[in-house]
Image (cartoon, rainbow, N blue to C red):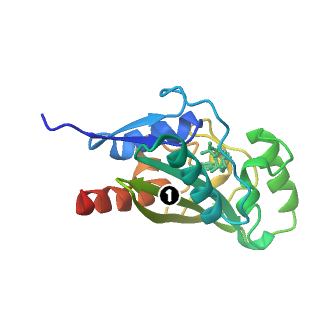
Amino acid sequence: MEKKHELVFATRNTHKIEEARAIVGDRFAILGLDEIGFDLELPENGNTLHENALEKLRTFVEATGRNAISDDSGLEIECLNGRPGVHTAHYSGSRNANLNMLRVLSEMSQCTVRTARFVTVLACNFQGKEFIFEGDVQGVITQEIRGSEGFGYDPIFIPEGYNQTFAELSAQVKNTLSHRAIAFRKLAEWLVSVD
Ligand code: ITT
């Protein structure tokens, strides 16, 4: 069998790693930071998802020289002028997903237009070549928390064309149509072209 390329996913978010494996794991061996014993904190000081994805990637590649990817993702809500955006991970002041969702729902109590999009900016350094991919999925924000699959803001996001939140849909469905699925499929095509 052909050997798979190893890509270190510069994250400690195990949900992201599982999703990446489910999307492209048959073609690439994806390893998380904890699996390779990398224990430095990766900085996220940027003002945009792009800046953060590149900062995490470059810090890791400079330290190790390994082929790597990093993902900075966010939820952009129309009625909140694009917030939480780059602040998605800590929107309530903590990383607690319930508190983050409750802050969003409370800020949206007067919003009749509930459209939003999830965005992933995926940065890759493969054999010294760097590239950025983006994926997004449109949807609407619910009035309440629904479902227990997935992670983060999945229980309040209904993707376009569905009636259930990402946390009510199966992982298989999410991994076909999510922001991350789109970005990782673009990455997989690019890797085939530069390999
Ligand atoms: P790393 O920086 O270590 O990769 P993180 O959890 O901090 O992991 P981000 O900086 O990209 O990830 O923060 C994005 C936040 O957005 C994340 O903590 C979740 O709350 C949320 N998020 C990202 N992707 C999501 C998804 O597919 N479904 C639901 N929420 C998501």
Rendered location of residue 41, percent (x, y): 67, 38
- Which of the two residues, 127 or 138, is positioned nearer the viewer here? 127
- Picture layout, residue 10 above or below residue 114: above
List x then y, in percent, for residue 151: 62, 40
In the image, what residue occupies the spot 30% across and 57% down?
191
Mark 1 beta carbon near ligand 1 (under 8 Å): no
Whether residue 164 is visible: no
**Which image quarter: residue 181?**
bottom left
Q: Which residue extends farthest left? A: 1
Q: Is residue 195 above or below residue 148?
A: below
Under circle 1, the secondary element is strand
The vertical placement of 99 against 76, above or below, is: above
What amino acid is found at the position of numbered circle 1 in the picture? Leu
| Residue at x 81% of width, y 69% of height | 111
Residue drawn at point x = 54 percent, y = 52 percent: 57
Nearer the observer, 66 or 179: 66
Q: Quick check: 49 left or right of 112?
A: left
- Label 1 CA crowd tier, 10 Å (few <14, some 14–19, many 20+): many
Residue 59, given in percent of the width and then of the height, sits at: 59, 49
Q: How many labels does the image show?
A: 1
Residue 187 position within the rendered picture, expressed as x and y whole percent measured from the top left: 37, 58
At a point 79% along the width and 47% down the height, the residue shown is: 100
The N terminus - image quarter: top left
Quarter of the image for residue 113 reads: bottom right
Q: Name the residue under label 1.
A: 122
Residue 94 visible from this viewpoint: yes
Q: In this view, does 151 lie to the left or right of 184?
A: right
Quadrant where the C terminus is found in the figure: bottom left
